[in-house]
Amino acid sequence: MKIVPSEITPYTNYLNRRSFIKGAIATSLTLSMSNPSLAYHESNTDHLLNQLDKNDTLNTFEEITNYNNFYEFGTGKTDPVQFSKNFKPLPWSVKIEGLVKKPMTYYLEDILNGITLEDRIYRLRCVEGWSMVIPWQGFPLKLLIEKVEPLGDAKYIQFETVYRPEEMPGQHRNVLPWPYVEGLRMDEAMHPLTILSTGLYGHDLLNQNGAPFRLVIPWKYGFKSIKSIVTIRFVEKEPVATWSFVNPREYGFYSNVNPEVDHPRWSQASERRIGEFSRRPTLMFNGYTAEVSHMYKGMNLTKYY
């Protein structure tokens, strides 16, 4: 799925436009996939600029949408953009189940009803040793959790990607057990940095980036940010995530970005930022130590990797 170059907002214009409408509600930039009256996109240029670290440069729209891991469409980096054209992200519904007071199937427009979409510029660090800086649009996962009212026994949340092999050719291959599953501890899910993203660069998410909405957890390796979510299950015990099930020695449940804990097959001390020639040092928790380290106080991060 592609957007023609004339429809792509250059980042300088992206910020300048938000500077002009600072503090306004920009309904024209909300999800075209849903009724615009249901969700608003609030712009805050100062917040955007504060999110962009002086050592970071935003990756281009082309880089972000043409270099992806999404094994449901294939294992190559360009497979998602090449083989996701037949994927139909609309209509979309999400099943909420498990230890909640309000289990039910919600249509996407129901989830977005009354939600204010926010701009979030986050670093994304892949476990493979590459990274990007991405301007997401979305909302805190916490809002959805509070809406469905989890029970006291709900300690974790399990997420599942849609299973549609007729539209996702990678699911015909046994490279992973399908559907793809991920999980978070409840405090991680409730953290204000954890968002459900509905777009990037002011556009709806494209198929190759996890349309119509996906998880984004900036202090964890990218595979934790599960895409095209159809099931959210509240559970008491730690769920078995796909990569942890396939190879627990290499992929732990937490998968926090940690330059001091190497992957068994390569170092995690540095990374290649897409678009840059040289490598740069990897930051603990991907640079979000001040915000998230308290959740892991006293934990052996070498053991709980």
Image: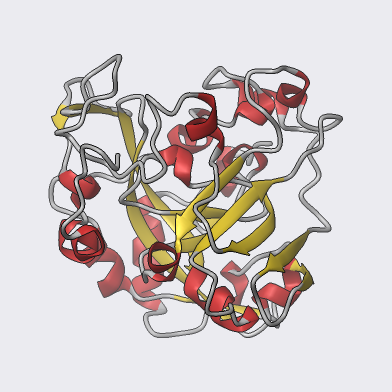
**Horizontal relation, residue 216 to residue 235: left or right:** left
**Residue at the right extreme, as displayed:** 166
Residue 159: % across, % down: 61, 53
Residue 34 visible in the picture:
no
Residue nearer the viewer, 304 or 20: 304
Position of 25 with respect to 232 (left or right) is left
The picture places residue 196, in percent across and down from the top left corner, at: 53, 62
88 in relation to 30, above or below: above
Residue 67, horizontal then vertical, whole percent: 48, 28
| Residue in view at x 30 percent, y 45 percent | 256
Q: Is residue 68 above or below residue 43?
A: above
Q: Which residue is located at x 52 percent, y 57 percent?
A: 237
Give the quarter of the figure containing the N terminus. Answer: top right
Q: Quadrant of the C terminus?
A: top left
Camera-side residue of 182 and 50: 182
Name the residue at 52% across, 29% down: 69
Q: Position of residue 273 (x, y in %)?
A: 27, 31
Colouring: secondary structure
Q: Residue furthest top?
A: 265
In the rendered structure, the answer to whether residue 119 lies left or right of residue 232 reads: left
